[in-house]
Every structure is written in C-alpha cells, then in structure tokens.
Image (cartoon, grey):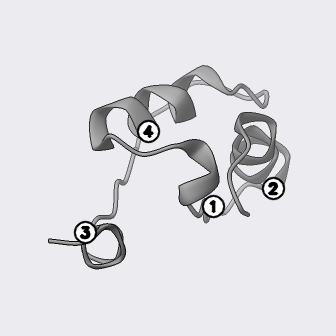
C-alpha cells in the first residue's frame, strides 16, 4: 500500500484530552506510530488555539 492510500485511510481521533495549550509532543507520537513525517500529515481540529497550532508547531499541514 503506498503512502497516499495509507494516509487517506487513516484517521486518529482523540477525545478527553485535558490539554488547553498547543503542544507538539502528541503530534510527534502519532507520526511515529504511523511511520510518517509531520510534513506528510494533515491536522484537522476544532480548537484552533490547541489543535491547529499544535499541528503547526509539529510541522504538519493544517
């Protein structure tokens, strides 16, 4: 399976996080588990100050 196909088939949803600030470590952990570089990922989130900013700090497309 090529990386595009694998990427389009993968979505990770995290609920119940108590974080209120942008932080890149969770994004790096997800990339490591998927064997992807941050720049190969797209971060979509509903909390711009936390989700989108965290993805940007990690080097992801947002």
The answer to whether mark 1 and mark 2 are in CB contact below 8 A is yes
**Closer to the camera, 23 or 38?**
38
Say which residue appears at 67% left-offset and 27% top-offset: 24
Q: How many neighbours does mark 1 have within 10 angstroms: few (below 14), some (14-19), or many (20 or more)?
A: some
**Closer to the camera, 28 or 21?**
28
Q: How many neighbours does mark 4 have within 10 angstroms: few (below 14), some (14-19), or many (20 or more)?
A: some
The answer to whether mark 1 and mark 4 are in CB contact below 8 A is no
Disc number lying in front (1 or 4)? 4
The image's mark for residue 6 is 3
Left or right, 22 with reference to 14: right
> What's the CA distance linking mark 1 and mark 2?
7 Å
> What's the CA distance linking mark 2 and mark 4?
20 Å
Disc number lying in front (1 or 3)? 3
Residue under circle 2?
A: 48
> What's the CA distance linking mark 2 and mark 3?
26 Å
Considering the image in quadrants, where does the C terminus appear?
bottom right
Left or right, 12 with reference to 37: left
Can you give x and y, in whole percent of width and height, for residue 51 in the image? 69, 48
Disc number lying in front (2 or 4)? 4
Say which residue appears at 50% left-offset and 31% top-offset: 17
Tell me the quarter of the picture where residue 21 sits.
Answer: top right
Q: Which of the two discs, 1 and 3, labels the residue nearer the N terminus?
A: 3
Q: Which of the two discs, 2 and 4, labels the residue nearer the N terminus?
A: 4
Q: Residue furthest left?
A: 1
Say which residue appears at 14% left-offset and 71% top-offset: 1
Element at label 3? helix
Residue under circle 4?
A: 31
**Closer to the camera, 44 or 47?**
44
Can you give x and y, in whole percent of width and height, for residue 35 in the image? 32, 40
Residue under circle 1?
A: 45
Say which residue appears at 64% left-offset and 52% top-offset: 39
């Amino acid at each position: 399976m090529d990386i595009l196909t694998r990427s389009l088939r993968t979505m990770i949803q995290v609920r119940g996080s108590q974080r209120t600030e942008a932080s890149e470590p969770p994004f790096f952990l997800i990339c490591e588990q998927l064997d992807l570089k941050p720049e190969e990922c797209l971060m979509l989130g509903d909390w711009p100050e936390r989700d989108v900013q965290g993805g940007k700090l990690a080097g992801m497309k947002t």
